[in-house]
Amino acid sequence: MSNSIIPKTDHVFHHFIYTPLNKLLAKHQAVNPEDKVLALFHRCAVEVPAYRQFLEARGVNPVEITSFEVFRELPLMGKTDYMQAYPLPERCLGGSLKGSDRVAVSSGSTGQPTFWPRSVAHELDVALRFEQVFCDSFRADERSTLAVVCFALGNWVGGLYTTSCCWHLARKGYPLMVATPGNNKAEIFRVVREMAPHFEQTVLLGYPPFVKDVIDAGAAEGINWARFNPKLVFAGEVFSEEWRSLIGQRIGSVSPCHDSASLYGTADGGVLGNETPFSIAIRRWLADHPEAARTLFGESRLPTLVQYDPASRFFEMHEGTLVVSGENSVPLVRYHIADKGGVLSYDEMWNVLREQGVQSLGYLGLNKDFQPRNLPFVYVFGRADFTVSYYGANIYPENVTVGLEQPEIIAWVTGKFVLETRETEDGDKYLHIAVELLPGIEPVEEMVPVIAESIRTQLLRLNSEFANYTPAERQLPRITLHSFADSEYFPAGVKHRYTRR
């Protein structure tokens, strides 16, 4: 094998390791992202055989793509018509897998699994997102930190990708130790009990429902989480700010904007953006001002709201969904990830906030001396097909979730549920919600009206369609309670779906 790739990789790695975060981001901000994505297009048109064929089949002459305005008219890449239509090596830079040294596999939730090779050179762009979280939110550059990777380990992108990025931070000089128990709770607890006392803080990284399970089960086994100054990194699911507050209470958090952060990532693009203290503060303010949230996002539910680096991952909108471009071993050029969402510049976000009466960081609960990074925002609702239609109103799982996270209910339920519409014998529709109880909690008849009323209250508060479209006598959902891991609604080992149609 040629050694031509090695010097480039060494150079990129050396640049990441020896350049401070602020300087790295400043260099990125000095780049015109539109010029950079146009240059990526021209490079791919020459060096990626599949993309060259993709363009030829659609009558696109790369020589004619001379401006960003014309670039925006290029055909979108998709999984079906591009990723699954051309052999894997032909989708790589140079038409070969030689430049890649690792591979991840997507879940296959939309069809057949897809393989995503990458190299350490491309991984460092993603490590920068982790560095933002660990430095800006957790101050891990100055605190000894135990990072406990609770994502599943294996071919899936979450666990090993996260581990590798954390190792890069440790090599950069962060006082960071990385433990990899994966999604094995017993191993996680063993690591925490033995290692966490030796560090100033402990970071748990995993999918939100699993991290909650770890915290609850650990507390039941006598782990005093607050003792370890825990921080949390999430990925993979949208959650409410009530949920963040609930988890914060259980770990002794006193700074919700700095003690957790969610990553927006995909197997194909890596981490595309990350929550920051600023984005979390905005989202928490919007959670308390649902009308402002509807004005900003056009929906009654809160999306994930993150900031992103357009010199690393370039976002566009297409018919209310997201399109991304970025360099990888399999480069993405106007790749349609099909997540429902949108983008806002830093200035656009501030303009919207000021129109809603937010005049300073203090309104958002941040210290006046806090300096947010001047990076644009992307908001993500996730796939657009997980709603239930009821009397013409779109009911979102996120709305129901808030109802289950109220103080009088959280001691009973896991947070999992299944939302569906049913019909009575007379043909009348009603909203049915199957709710999973915590292990050891027996169903009690008195729980049902409390849960139903809480969910109705939050639906009326958060979902204007529900409040205006649904007759008052049909607004109270019918609740059924189910034991933990119930085989019909909540089978163990199966990816949970919150809606049925």
Image (tube, rainbow, N blue to C red):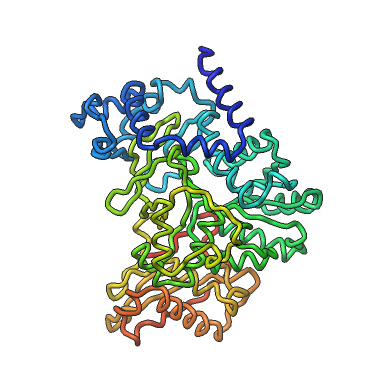
Vertical relation: 352 (above or below) 162: below
Question: Residue 474 appears at what percent x and percent y?
Answer: 35, 83
Question: Residue 406 appears at what percent x and percent y?
Answer: 55, 76
- Between 367 and 110, the residue placed more toward the observer is 367
- Between 179 and 279, the residue placed more toward the observer is 279
Q: Residue at x 41, y 79 (%)?
A: 477
Q: Residue at x 45, y 29 (%)?
A: 329
Q: Judge from the rendering whether residue 316 lies leftward or rightward of residue 446; answer left or right.
A: left
Q: Is residue 137 visible?
A: yes
Furthest toward the top, the residue is 2
Q: Judge from the rendering whether residue 91 lies leftward or rightward of residue 248; answer left or right.
A: left
Q: Residue at x 29, y 25 (%)?
A: 52
Q: Splitting the image into 4 quarters, where does residue 397 fall?
A: bottom left
Q: Is residue 79 visible?
A: no
> In the rendered picture of this protein, how many numbered marks are placed on residues?
0
Question: Residue 50 appears at what percent x and percent y?
Answer: 32, 26
Vertical relation: 341 (above or below) 314: below
Q: Residue at x 55, y 17 (%)?
A: 7
Question: Residue 321 appears at what percent x and percent y?
Answer: 33, 51
Give the quarter of the figure containing the C terminus.
Answer: bottom left
Vertical relation: 211 (above or below) 326: below
